[in-house]
Image (cartoon, helix red, strand yellow):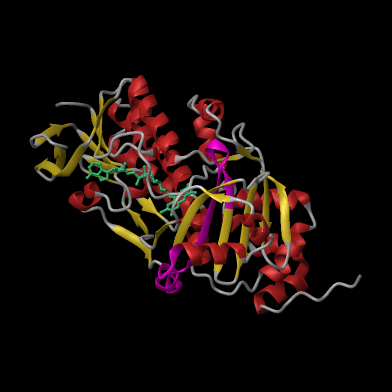
């Protein structure tokens, strides 16, 4: 055997898993077809539970020292009301950080190497090897080299939403939802933000987050049906859409675009069974959802921690590996499902019947705003916050009936 565990893909999910397994004393070989630092098509919010893990692993302070700014306050402009508030504290973290992926992913790859993992960059995995119904290793080719195989008792697919490992292992898919949105983003200099800004409007969502090098990343999400029209003049249509919300028109007039507009409609929503004989999946390979709620990085980091704990328990003999992975699977699905359902609902851009009643009520109470931001950041389960009993306490019985009926809130005088 070449290693105890092979990890395919070394961005947030794979590098974090490789680091944690190596820190636990396992022999880890991690491969990625790309070479780091490497960018990827993604915006950068690391939600608070993910930031808390980076802190626990000793990596958040490095990001902060490298200049990644904190977004402690968020303005959520829902149209009928503007919520402004602070995040709750989660594991010693009270802000969303938005590091460029060139920085975050490289930091994690370096941390995996420092922990003792062997990381092979520029290695393309083409398939799996197997015997007797078990996965036994990977086969692939280093860029410019000759084909090779590596063997290990466990192969982890951290190779993203179109995972080669998941396909080759035959991972079962479930709870899939069709793609309903498209997203595009770019960076601006001279567009200062004091925190995060989220604008929800009929048929679009715009978010602003401070990122590295004094830049602000501006993301626009639209219904999939609008994507073809948007792409006829991507930059022009993107700028016009973003400038149409809040005071962004004026602010963008004095800002300077610092990169091309990048766009994608390759936004699947699917759960995959994350383990089987000789294989496991982590991050997007095992569960991917629309980026409209910016959960994927934090999910991949949480998944890395839960999966690696199960593997350490299983390979270390504290618990049968299969039972440990089954528990990890259950926990992942229980923890992620409320956010997955909320995300796929938001990505459908249906008219918001509850917002006109709910958001003004939340906006009036700073503690509720913080709790709501806790839901958006994935720290509080969405289904707990949106339970009828909780909503009744927030908007009253009449308000709840109005929300259900989709009637507007009565106008307030003064
Ligand atoms: C437009 C957009 C915006 C987003 N914004 C956010 C956001 O603000 N916040 C957030 O939390 N999430 C966001 N996401 C989601 C986030 O990007 C992903 O959830 C996250 O990158 C998943 O990490 P991962 O490590 O699982 O997989 P990936 O980041 O996809 O990494 C997979 C790695 O596997 C490697 N690989 C793939 N196939 C092979 C192979 N055959 N051989 C070798 N290597 C291979 C790839 O080179 C890659 O490095 C966004 C996504 C999109 C599309």
Asked whether 371 falls inside the magenta stretch, the response is no
Image spot of residue 44 (x, y percent): 49, 45
128 vs 299, left or right, is: left
| Residue 320 vertical placement versus 402 (above, below) | above
Could you tell me if residue 24 is visible in this image? Answer: no
Image spot of residue 62 (x, y percent): 51, 25
Where does the C terminus fall, quadrant-wise?
A: bottom right
Where does the N terminus fall, quadrant-wise?
A: top left
Q: Nearer the viewer, residue 366 or 120?
A: 120
2 vs 66, left or right, is: left
| Residue 271 vertical placement versus 179 (above, below) | above
Image spot of residue 95 (x, y percent): 62, 39
Q: Nearer the viewer, residue 260 or 371?
A: 260
Q: Nearer the viewer, residue 256 or 312?
A: 256
Asked whether 222 falls inside the magenta stretch, the response is yes
Residue at screen point 70% across, 48% down:
370
User: Residue 128 is drawn in which quadrant?
Assistant: top left
Instruction: State the count of labels.
Output: 0
Q: Which residues are magenta?
A: 208-234
Image spot of residue 222 (x, y percent): 49, 67
Q: Nearer the viewer, residue 27 or 212?
A: 212
160 vs 383, left or right, is: left
Residue at screen point 48% across, 55% down:
185
Could you tell me if residue 383 is visible in this image? Answer: yes
| Residue 405 vertical placement versus 105 (above, below) | below
As drawn, the residue found furthest toward the right would be 414
């Amino acid at each position: 055997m070449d290693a105890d565990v092979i990890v395919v893909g070394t961005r947030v999910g794979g590098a974090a898993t490789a680091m944690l397994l190596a820190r636990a004393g396992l022999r880890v070989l991690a491969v990625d077809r790309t070479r780091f630092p490497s960018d990827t098509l993604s915006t950068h919010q690391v939600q608070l539970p993910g930031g808390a893990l980076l802190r626990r692993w000793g990596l958040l302070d490095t990001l902060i020292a490298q200049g990644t700014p904190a977004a402690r306050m968020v303005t959520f402009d829902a149209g009928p009301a503007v919520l402004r508030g602070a995040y709750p504290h989660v594991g010693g973290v009270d802000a969303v950080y938005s590091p460029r992926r060139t920085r975050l992913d490289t930091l994690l790859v370096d941390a995996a190497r420092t922990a003792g993992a062997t990381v092979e960059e520029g290695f393309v995995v083409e398939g799996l090897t197997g015997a007797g119904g078990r996965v036994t290793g990977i086969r692939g080719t280093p860029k410019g080299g000759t084909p090779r195989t590596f063997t290990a008792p466990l192969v982890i697919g951290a190779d993203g939403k179109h995972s080669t490992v998941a396909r080759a292992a035959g991972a079962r898919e479930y709870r899939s939802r069709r793609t309903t949105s498209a997203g595009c983003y770019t960076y601006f200099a001279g567009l200062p933000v004091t925190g995060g800004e989220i604008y929800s409007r009929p048929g679009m969502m715009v978010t602003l987050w401070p990122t590295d090098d004094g830049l602000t990343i501006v993301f626009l999400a639209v219904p999939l049906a609008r994507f073809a029209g948007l792409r006829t003049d991507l930059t022009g249509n993107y700028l016009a859409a973003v400038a149409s919300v809040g005071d962004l028109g004026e602010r963008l007039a004095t800002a300077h675009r610092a990169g091309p507009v990048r766009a994608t409609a390759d936004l699947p929503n699917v759960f995959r069974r994350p383990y089987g004989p000789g294989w496991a999946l982590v991050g997007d390979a095992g569960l991917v959802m629309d980026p409209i709620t910016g959960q994927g990085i934090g999910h991949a980091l949480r998944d890395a921690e839960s999966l690696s704990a199960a593997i350490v328990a299983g390979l270390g003999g504290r618990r049968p590996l299969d039972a440990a992975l089954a528990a990890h699977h259950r926990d992942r699905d229980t923890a992620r499902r409320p956010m997955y359902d909320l995300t796929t609902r938001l990505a459908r851009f249906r008219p918001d019947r509850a917002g006109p009643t709910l958001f003004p009520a939340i906006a009036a109470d700073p503690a509720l705003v913080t709790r709501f931001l806790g839901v958006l950041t994935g720290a509080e389960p969405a289904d707990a916050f949106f339970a009828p009993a909780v909503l009744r306490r927030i908007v009253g019985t009449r308000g709840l009936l109005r929300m259900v009926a989709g009637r507007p809130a009565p106008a307030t005088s003064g």
